[in-house]
């Protein structure tokens, strides 16, 4: 009951930002898809010889991937990163700025519950905002046969990896915001770490390693944020 | 019973003293008669926006002075004249208070006859009111 | 044996090298209203935040409702109402949304009728976002949100700061109303000594992080006295009397602020010092507080007398 109230409270707070992200993402992606379907690019298609397990997820080659759906990739990645940074800012920096932490913390729940509610709201936001849209795009392109070659599931997975990377950025930014360290010392290490993980994940040769990197990063960031939050002063 | 008591926290007198004095004056002037019921502690505290314990203390002082008596469960009532005749102990306390007043008066530089004149002038107010202005 | 709802034991807080609170020892029993007073920056908010587990003490400990402040359980927090400094609420929410949010944390305890009555009494718009409210209105919402769960212990951090007299009075009414229920306690910090004088049973005075007084309001009021002595020629150069707090001189006059000295001793000293006459000046709580927390021997800021 209380946990749900906390999550609901968070979702209500971030709703405005979510709507903006969804609209922008859908609009841009839709445009890319539409133009890709309408004007197939022969150059890219000739380069394309099908997916092999050896192909990397890397951002660089992604740009080389043929439209229509893979053109959305970069947009998805950037949206995910922006969403992550935005959520972290709204959930943690705003509280600090508006001095409402005292009001938030004094609740008949444990402090960790308060934090988990925020995390849950963020995860829900990512899924609803980007995850659902991306999956729908994939299904649409597959169903419409709009892609010149069969669309492997790997494309879908790669998109979700981008979403997860956005989540990594979120946790990294959250850790930075929650950290009580001074700005010119280690406060921003969380965000920097998340940025490094972003690059590290994108250069992986296999999806498994990519997931492993992300999973490890998430575990580190979540536990560190939890520790910091529980012992912090408000 | 339309008893109004006003307190002002900034005046320098403790609040309970202000209540005691006002009720005491009202009794002396005949505005409150024997058997009249004082407002309940809760009511007076809520009305004046003060701590209920202050009202309790004021009522207790009035009771010790023999002006009122409290019946648990019913409330606080103004005592009859019999109750207010004062026994020897009360009169001794009064005498001591008078000494304090007189000492203060003399320290202010007043002469004995000034003090007596002051007493005479002021007691006139009470006695007149008491005999002629009685309600109920 | 009365239960202590609020206890601190040598509670100390350093911010870096700055001492904000120095070994605060308090024991507040159930059923009273405790006024926590001190000058700006004396350490009131620090003390309150420490008690509520929002800050960590450098040394010492505190307990609320028998529970250590650093480990306040959810169940304890449910019994403690807290009005934060500045009445900070979520700006983006409306009263209705805040009500829904707040009452989720007090199942079975929330008084719908009281909340509705208070909002109506204050004439507050239920569907407007808090960011469009004035400070006073926000304070009123804060009060309603805190009283509706009927807390056993109400902790308020300078709840009437910057509010007009009418709203201040509403806060006092709220406190009185709460205290008249069984087993309720109120602990509030304030700058308005008049308010403290009205409602407090106990007064706690803190000055530059140090506890200076912790007693019943009656006792404090009776203990701090200001006496003006007049001398024929000039006042004695040295004043030795117990409990001397402050001493001011003017030609032929001596103004002493004393603590805990009864009237007989004053009369004795007046005689031994050769005073012509003396007068005990009536002081209200604000005057007493100012004298009590003034640094001894301070001079006036604006000189109006020529000595």
Image: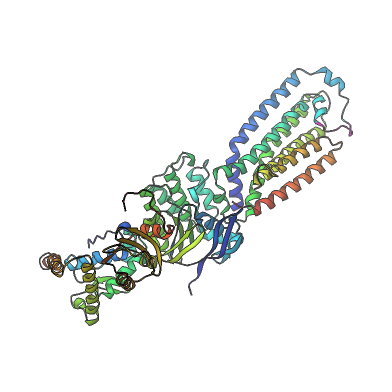
- Viewer-closest of B122 and A213: B122
- Left or right of B46 in this view: C189: right
Q: Please, is residue B81 above or below residue C175 in the view?
A: below
- Left or right of C201 in this view: B114: left
Q: In this picture, which residue range is highlighted in magenta? A: A52-58
Q: Please, is residue B79 above or below residue A127 in the view?
A: below
Q: Position of residue C193 (x, y in %)?
A: 39, 56
Q: Position of residue A164 (x, y in %)?
A: 74, 39
Q: Please, is residue B86 above or below residue C266 in the view?
A: below
- Viewer-closest of C244 and C137: C244
Classify residue C205 by image quadrant: bottom left
Q: Position of residue C282 (x, y in %)?
A: 30, 62
Give the colour scheme of this rendering: rainbow
Classify residue C10 by image quadrant: bottom right
Magenta segment includes C211: no
Q: Is residue A112 visible?
A: no
Dominant secondary structure of the magenta stretch?
A: loop
Q: Residue at x 62, y 32 (%)?
A: A20
- Viewer-closest of A42 and C188: C188
- Left or right of C115 in this view: C75: right
Classify residue A24 by image quadrant: top right
Q: Is residue B58 visible?
A: yes
Q: How many marks?
A: 0
Q: Residue at x 75, y 21 (%)?
A: A36
Q: Position of residue C184 (x, y in %)?
A: 45, 64
Q: Residue at x 75, y 38 (%)?
A: A195
Magenta segment includes A53: yes
């Amino acid at each position: 009951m209380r946990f749900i109230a906390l999550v609901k409270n968070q979702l209500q707070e971030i709703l405005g930002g979510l709507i903006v992200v969804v609209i922008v993402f859908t609009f841009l992606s839709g445009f890319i898809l539409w133009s890709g379907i309408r004007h197939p690019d022969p150059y890219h298609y000739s380069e394309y010889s099908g997916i092999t397990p050896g192909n990397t997820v890397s951002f660089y080659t992604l740009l080389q991937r043929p439209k229509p759906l893979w053109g959305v990739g970069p947009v998805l990645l950037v949206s995910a990163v922006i969403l992550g940074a935005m959520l972290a800012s709204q959930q943690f920096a705003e509280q600090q700025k508006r001095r409402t932490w005292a009001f938030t913390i004094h609740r008949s729940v444990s402090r960790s519950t308060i934090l988990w509610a925020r995390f849950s709201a963020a995860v829900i936001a990512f899924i609803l905002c980007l995850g659902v849209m991306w999956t729908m795009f994939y299904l649409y392109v597959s169903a419409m046969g709009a892609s010149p070659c069969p669309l492997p599931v790997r494309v879908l997975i790669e998109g979700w990896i981008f979403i997860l990377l956005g989540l990594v950025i979120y946790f990294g930014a959250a850790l930075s915001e929650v950290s009580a360290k001074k700005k010119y010392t280690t406060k921003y290490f969380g965000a920097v770490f998340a940025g490094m993980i972003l690059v590290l994940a994108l250069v992986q040769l296999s999806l498994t390693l990519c997931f492993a990197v992300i999973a490890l990063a998430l575990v580190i960031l979540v536990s560190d944020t939890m520790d910091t939050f529980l012992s912090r002063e408000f | 019973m339309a008893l109004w008591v006003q307190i002002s926290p900034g005046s320098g007198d403790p609040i309970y003293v202000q209540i005691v004095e006002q009720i005491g004056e009202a009794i002396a002037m005949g505005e409150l008669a024997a058997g009249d019921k004082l407002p309940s502690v809760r009511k007076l505290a809520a009305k004046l926006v003060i701590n209920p314990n202050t009202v309790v203390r004021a009522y207790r002082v009035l009771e010790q002075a023999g002006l009122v008596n409290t019946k648990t469960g019913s409330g606080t009532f103004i005592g009859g004249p019999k109750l207010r005749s004062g026994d020897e102990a009360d009169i001794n306390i009064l005498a001591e208070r008078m000494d304090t007043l007189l000492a203060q008066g003399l320290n202010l530089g007043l002469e004995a006859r000034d003090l007596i004149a002051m007493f005479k002038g002021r007691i006139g107010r009470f006695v007149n009111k008491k005999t002629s202005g009685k309600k109920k | 044996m009365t239960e202590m709802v609020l206890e601190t034991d040598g509670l100390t807080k350093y911010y870096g090298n700055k001492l904000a609170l120095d070994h605060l020892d308090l024991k507040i029993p159930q059923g009273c209203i405790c006024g926590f007073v001190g000058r700006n920056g004396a350490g009131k908010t620090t003390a309150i935040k420490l008690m509520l587990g929002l800050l960590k003490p450098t040394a010492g400990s505190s307990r609320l409702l028998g529970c250590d402040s650093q480990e306040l359980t959810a169940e304890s927090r449910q019994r403690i109402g807290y009005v934060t400094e500045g009445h900070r609420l979520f700006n983006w929410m409306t009263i209705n949304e805040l009500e829904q949010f707040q009452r989720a944390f007090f199942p079975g305890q929330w008084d719908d009728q009281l909340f509705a009555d208070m909002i109506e009494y204050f004439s507050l718009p239920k569907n407007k976002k808090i960011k469009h409210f004035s400070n006073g209105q926000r304070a009123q919402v804060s009060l309603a949100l805190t009283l509706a769960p009927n807390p056993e212990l109400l902790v308020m951090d300078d709840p009437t700061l910057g509010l007009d007299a009418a709203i201040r009075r509403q806060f006092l009414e709220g406190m009185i109303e709460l205290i008249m229920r069984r087993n309720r306690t109120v602990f509030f910090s304030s700058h308005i000594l008049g308010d403290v004088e009205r409602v407090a049973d106990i007064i706690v005075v803190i000055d530059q992080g140090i506890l200076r007084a912790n007693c019943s309001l009656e006792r404090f009021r009776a203990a701090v006295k200001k006496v003006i002595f007049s001398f024929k020629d000039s006042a004695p150069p040295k004043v030795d009397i117990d409990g001397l707090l402050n001493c001011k001189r003017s030609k032929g006059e001596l103004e002493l602020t004393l603590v805990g000295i009864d009237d007989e001793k004053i009369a004795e000293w007046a005689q031994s010092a050769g005073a012509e006459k003396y007068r005990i000046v009536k002081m209200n709580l604000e005057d007493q507080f100012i004298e009590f927390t003034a640094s001894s021997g301070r001079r006036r800021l604006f000189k109006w007398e020529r000595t």
